[in-house]
Image (cartoon, grey):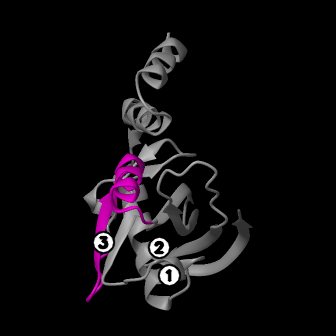
Amino acid sequence: MKAAALLTIVMAGGARRAAVRAELRQENSYRAASPEIEDFVRQAIEDRFKAGDIPDLGLLDARAHVPLLRELPRARLQLSHRALPVIDGTTFELMGLDEARLRADRTRAAVAYLTVDDPRIDGDTGSLRLGADLTMPAKPGGVKTCCCVGRAEFRRAQSLWVFVKWSAMTCA
């Protein structure tokens, strides 16, 4: 049934619009991240952003306004405003993948954002995938040749998450 509905959408409009509609429909399959996960995500981004140590952080032209991808695709989680870091001089906003696609198409420019995924907490240790990514405007034959994410490891000390090391880096 889902495949038939998706096929109908593709036949009714452009593939890009169909992908956005499918993403909107799938958004309901994301669970809300727990407060513990959101606090971990917020502290991890704050720590690494202040250190300037996020894979492909240079993709973000302006550091005064930083989008953060709302969806965590591998974990099938969705972040709320609780996960947004608070750093003087920088405003973070949640942006859905569908919104990034629409913004890229509307502006005809790449849209860069921070992405986080696969958060794991085990007692006083935690890790997550963290990096910057971008969405390109729809263009036949267009190819995205970046981005890098790393698995950042942290330990909890007096209720704060402290960075330990990068344990893996993946670049596409």
Can you tell which mark lies on residue 48?
Answer: 1
Q: Is residue 66 left or right of residue 140?
A: left
| Residue type at numbered disc 1 | Arg
Q: Indicate the secondary structure of the residue bearing disc 1.
A: helix
Q: Is residue 47 magenta?
A: no
Can you tell which mark lies on residue 92?
Answer: 3
Mark sitting earlier along the chain (3/1): 1
Determine the residue positioned at 36% across, 50% down.
Answer: 102
Residue 129 figure quarter: bottom right
Name the residue nearer the viewer: 109 or 27.
109
User: Given this view, does label 3 or label 2 mark the residue nearer the observer?
Assistant: 3
Magenta stretch? 85-109
Q: Position of residue 161 (x, y in %)?
A: 47, 75
Q: How many numbered markers are drawn?
A: 3
Can you tell which mark lies on residue 78?
Answer: none
Residue 120 figure quarter: bottom right
- Quadrant (top left/top right/bottom left/bottom right) for the C terminus: bottom right
Q: What is the C-alpha distance between the residues marked 1 and 2?
A: 6 Å
